[in-house]
């Protein structure tokens, strides 16, 4: 990872990814349910948003001027 490509959007994407994973783990421990469709849908949105956001911001090509 090259730190020159890190910006606020990349950091927000990483935080979104971590929020999705931590939410799923917290929900499973708190309620003892690991197979709930509701938490799956929220987790998938957060995790995929974090992954795609990271890929779009981190590997963005520089425009030639």
Image: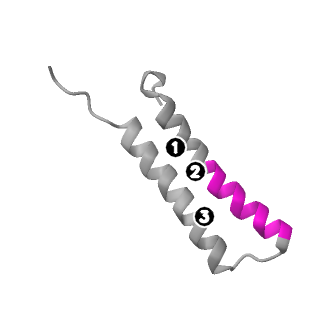
Which percent across, then down, holds residue 19? 65, 51
Which residue of the protein is positioned furthest toward the left in this rendering? 65
| Residue that appears at 50% across and 31% down | 8
Considering the numbered disc 2 on the image, is that residue within a helix, a strand or a loop? helix
Residue in front for this viewpoint, 59 or 45: 45
Considering the numbered disc 1 on the image, is that residue within a helix, a strand or a loop? helix
- Label of residue 43 in the image: 3
Which percent across, then down, holds residue 60? 32, 36
Q: Quadrant of residue 11?
A: top right
Report the number of discs: 3
Q: Magenta stretch containing residue 31, yes or no?
A: no
Indicate whether 33 appears above or below 47: below
Indicate whether 55 appears above or below 27: above
Residue 47 as seen in the image, left or right of residue 27: left
Residue 16 as seen in the image, left or right of residue 7: right
Helix, strand or loop for the magenta stretch, by majority: helix
| Residue that appears at 78% across and 61% down | 26
| Residue that appears at 85% across and 67% down | 30
Residue 39 as seen in the image, left or right of residue 10: right
Q: Magenta stretch containing residue 24, yes or no?
A: yes
Q: How far apart in space, not on screen, are marks 3 and 2 (Cα)? A: 9 Å
Instruction: Give the residue pinned by disc 1.
Output: 13
Q: Quadrant of the C terminus?
A: top left
Instruction: Give the residue pinned by disc 2.
Output: 17
Q: Quadrant of residue 39?
A: bottom right
- Residues packed near mark 3 inside 10 Å, few (<14), some (14 to 19) or many (20 plus): many
Which contiguous range is marked in magenta? Answer: 18-30
């Amino acid at each position: 990872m090259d730190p020159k490509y890190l910006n606020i959007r990349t950091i927000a994407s990483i935080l979104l990814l971590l929020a999705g994973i931590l939410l799923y783990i917290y929900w499973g421990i708190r309620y003892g349910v690991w197979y709930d469709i509701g938490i799956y849908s929220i987790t998938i949105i957060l995790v995929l948003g974090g992954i795609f956001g990271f890929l779009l911001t981190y590997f963005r090509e520089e425009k030639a001027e």
